[in-house]
Image (spheres, rainbow, N blue to C red):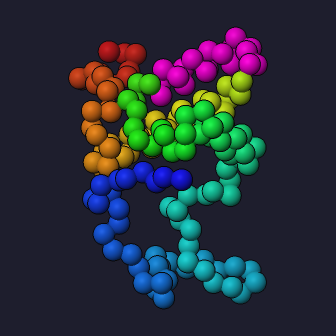
């Protein structure tokens, strides 16, 4: 399996020692008397749907069998993910069941976010961010 070749600036410049425990300085006390570093601001992966994650993982495996392992991580324009995501939403609205369109929506949203963040960090070409910016548009219907 090949791994994506990200530029050096996208990798952490230093890693904590294997003997170091990263600490926020905040503590959470449990009824049992146990104490642990707080999980505030760290996300809540235990709250994610395992149903959705399993279907997303299967969709990802289907894609690697079709396109090759980690192919998408090489970079694709953001609008390709948006277009595909919308087409899958339309298929859901139309009642199509020829493939798992729900998992395809999640996959395209994940790839969109991943690619956007890597273009912002300089790990992927900024040219992949081909979204049009509407200068001055706030999204308000009152404009």
At 28% from the left and 24% from the top, the residue drawn is 133
In this view of the protein, can residue 56 be seen by the observer?
no
Residue 44 lies, in percent from the top left, at: 61, 57
Magenta stretch: includes residue 35? no
Nearest the camera: 139 or 61?
A: 61
Q: Is residue 136 left or right of residue 93?
A: left
At 41% from the left and 24% from the top, the residue drawn is 79
Total marks shown come to 0
Residue 43 lies, in percent from the top left, at: 55, 58
Q: Quadrant of residue 67?
A: top right
Q: Quadrant of residue 99?
A: top right
User: Which quadrant does the C terminus fall into?
Assistant: top left
Q: Quadrant of residue 101?
A: top right
Q: Is residue 1 left or right of residue 103?
A: left
Residue 9 lies, in percent from the top left, at: 27, 59
Residue 45 lies, in percent from the top left, at: 63, 56
In this view of the protein, can residue 81 be seen by the observer?
yes
- The chief SS type of the magenta part is helix
At 28% from the left and 40% from the top, the residue drawn is 125
- Which residue of the protein is positioned furthest toward the left in this rendering? 135
Q: Is residue 12 left or right of residue 20?
A: left
Q: Which residues are magenta?
A: 81-98
Magenta stretch: includes residue 84? yes
- Give the vertical position of 11 relative to 79 (above or below): below
């Amino acid at each position: 399996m090949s791994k994506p070749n990200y530029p050096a600036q996208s990798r952490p410049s230093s890693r904590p020692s294997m003997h170091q425990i990263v600490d926020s300085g905040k503590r959470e006390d449990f009824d049992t008397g146990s104490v642990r570093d707080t999980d505030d601001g760290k996300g809540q992966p235990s709250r994610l749907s395992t149903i959705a994650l399993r279907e997303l993982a299967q969709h990802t495996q289907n894609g690697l069998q079709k396109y090759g392992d980690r192919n998408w991580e090489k970079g694709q324009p953001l609008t390709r993910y948006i277009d595909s995501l919308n087409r899958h939403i339309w298929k859901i609205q139309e009642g199509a069941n020829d493939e798992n369109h729900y998992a395809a929506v999640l996959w395209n949203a994940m790839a969109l976010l991943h690619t956007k963040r890597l273009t912002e960090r300089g790990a992927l070409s900024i040219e992949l961010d081909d979204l049009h910016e509407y200068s001055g548009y706030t999204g308000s219907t009152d404009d």
